[in-house]
Image: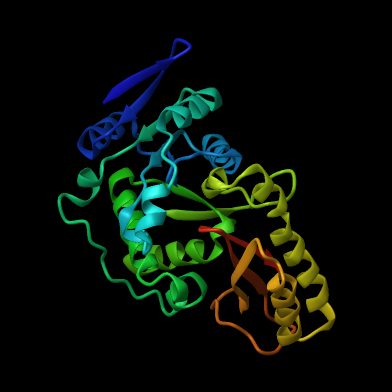
Amino acid sequence: MFALNFNNTAMHIFYGKVALIAYLKTIKTTNSTIGFVPTMGALHQGHLALMQRSIKENDDTVVSIFVNPTQFNNPEDLEKYPRTLEEDVKKMRNLSDKIILYAPTVDDIYEGHTISQSFDFDGLENQMEGKFRPGHFNGVGTIVKRLFEIVTPTNAYFGEKDFQQLQIVKKMVEKTQLPVNVIGCPIFREDNQLAMSSRNERLTPEERKEAAIIYKTLTEAKEIFKNASPEETIKFVENSFKDNERFDLEYFVIADESTLLPIDHKSKDKNYRAFIAVFVNSIRLIDTISLN
């Protein structure tokens, strides 16, 4: 364990699971609760909001910062993913000096075997992100399961920007019977409504400004969907990006919220959600919006 000090305020930081587990045993009581916010660092206001909620709702809060190699199918994306631990610690310290940080090495997590487990998520893994990023959700399931086993949280907090990931984590917890309550939290957005993401740091100021088109298109699609078919709504979105030289639409999908299966018609008793992935140069941005 290390105690880093910023402005005379100490913060518990662990780089190894053995020390973290030992420390958590000293603070746990029969009735106490642990909140957990897993992140890959490059923290933004969305992450901090998850931490604030955890602090409010639990006796102790653990945050992990770990860029997980097994969920990247693109080596370049893994290499370029922002790593800003010192700045992240400052942001957390400014939020609360009671946060417990776990910032492990790859070897501490994978113990020399950096490979994913194989999971069956009842088909949730085959849509959208899973279709375009083979093996991604096996990597997500592997790291989240491992972190849950190490931290043993009562409640775990995830942002709804990665809605498919949220559903995957819930399914993993259900199937492995881990005693964790998985809580989805609203998307935090920048002033231009771009969904906050660590990848936004890689955008130029001009790209960041123009990326407002993503959420603007989603909200317009939501209005169109009220009176149009899924096919007509999808065509509208595809045409919105067709002649845009800066942005390359990877996918736009309208799916059933519970199954994540794409739909071809609407039913009154279903909840629907739109999912989008867009490339800005080599930087991949995702977003989602409820259509109900």
Relative to 11, say whether 269 is above or below. Answer: below
Residue 179 seen by the camera: no
Residue 27 seen by the camera: yes
User: As drawn, is 140 to the left or to the right of 280?
Assistant: left
User: As drawn, is 275 to the left or to the right of 157?
Assistant: right
Quick one: which residue is furthest to the left in this view? Answer: 112
Which image quadrant is residue 6 in? Answer: top left
At horizontal 41% and vertical 48% (from top left) the residue drawn is: 80
Quadrant assignment for the N terminus? top left
Which image quadrant is residue 217 in? Answer: bottom right
At horizontal 49% and vertical 38% (from top left) the residue drawn is: 58
Which image quadrant is residue 175 in? Answer: bottom left
Quick one: which residue is furthest to the top in this view? Answer: 8
Quick one: which residue is furthest to the front in this view? Answer: 245
Q: Position of residue 3 (x, y in %)?
A: 33, 20
Relative to 79, say whether 230 is above or below. Answer: below
Q: Position of residue 69 (x, y in %)?
A: 32, 54
Q: Nearer the viewer, residue 259 or 31?
A: 259
Q: Nearer the viewer, residue 182 or 169?
A: 169
Quadrant assignment for the C terminus? bottom right
Q: Position of residue 286 (x, y in %)?
A: 58, 61
Relative to 190, say whether 145 is above or below. Answer: below
Q: Nearer the viewer, residue 251 or 226?
A: 251
Q: Position of residue 268 (x, y in %)?
A: 75, 83
User: What kind of colouring is applied to the model shown?
Assistant: rainbow
